[in-house]
Image (cartoon, grey):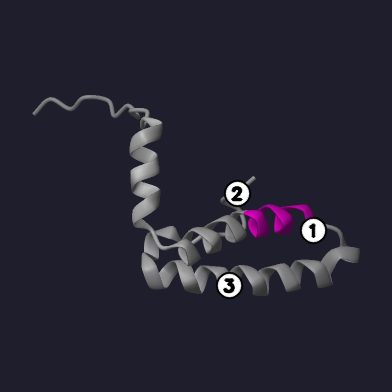
Amino acid sequence: MITLPSTQVPVPDAVALLIGQQIPKHVLDAEIEAVTLAYRISLCRKPETVQAREYNLGQLARANKTLAAYNPKLVVTPGSAA
């Protein structure tokens, strides 16, 4: 069997728009919030920012709960958004 290297094919804007219209608004909002929170968590590395990191982890868990209810593959981890 011959395997071809997998290359990513760009998705046209119109197709991305159609896909986005199929996802409920609260899920899109949760995804945006989760990515933002994951970035904020990556900034909280100092001992002085422990409370902010814990708060953002809690908010990320809340956003991930919404994402996982829609599709478990959408869950965002703290190290996945930089």
- For badge 3, the amino acid type reads Ala
Give the spatial CA distance, label 2 vs label 1. Answer: 14 Å
Q: In this rendering, would 78 be left or right of 27?
A: right
- Closer to us: 26 or 7: 26
Please identify the residue farthest to the right as the structure is shown.
48
| x and y percentages locating residue 81 in the rendered image | 60, 49
Residue sitting at 46 percent across and 64 percent down? 27
Does residue 72 lie above or below 16 as drawn?
below
| x and y percentages locating residue 26 in the rendered image | 49, 66
Confirm whether the magenta stretch covers residue 27. Answer: no
Residue topped by disc 3:
61
Residue topped by disc 1:
44
- For badge 1, the amino acid type reads Cys
Residue sitting at 38 percent across and 40 percent down? 16
Confirm whether the magenta stretch covers residue 37. Answer: yes
Residue interval drawn in magenta: 36-43
User: In which quarter of the view is residue 24 placed?
Assistant: bottom left
User: In which quarter of the view is residue 61 placed?
Assistant: bottom right
Residue sitting at 61 percent across and 53 percent down? 79
Residue topped by disc 2:
81
Give the spatial CA distance, label 3 vs label 1. Answer: 16 Å
Closer to the N terminus: mark 3 or mark 1? 1
Q: Residues within 10 Å of mark 2 (few under 14, many from 20)?
A: some
- For badge 2, the amino acid type reads Ala
Q: Residues within 10 Å of mark 3 (few under 14, many from 20)?
A: some
- Closer to us: 11 or 76: 11
| x and y percentages locating residue 56 in the rendered image | 71, 68
Give the spatial CA distance, label 3 vs label 2. Answer: 15 Å
State the SS at label 2.
loop
| x and y percentages locating residue 6 in the rendered image | 29, 29
Magenta stretch: helix, strand or loop mostly = helix
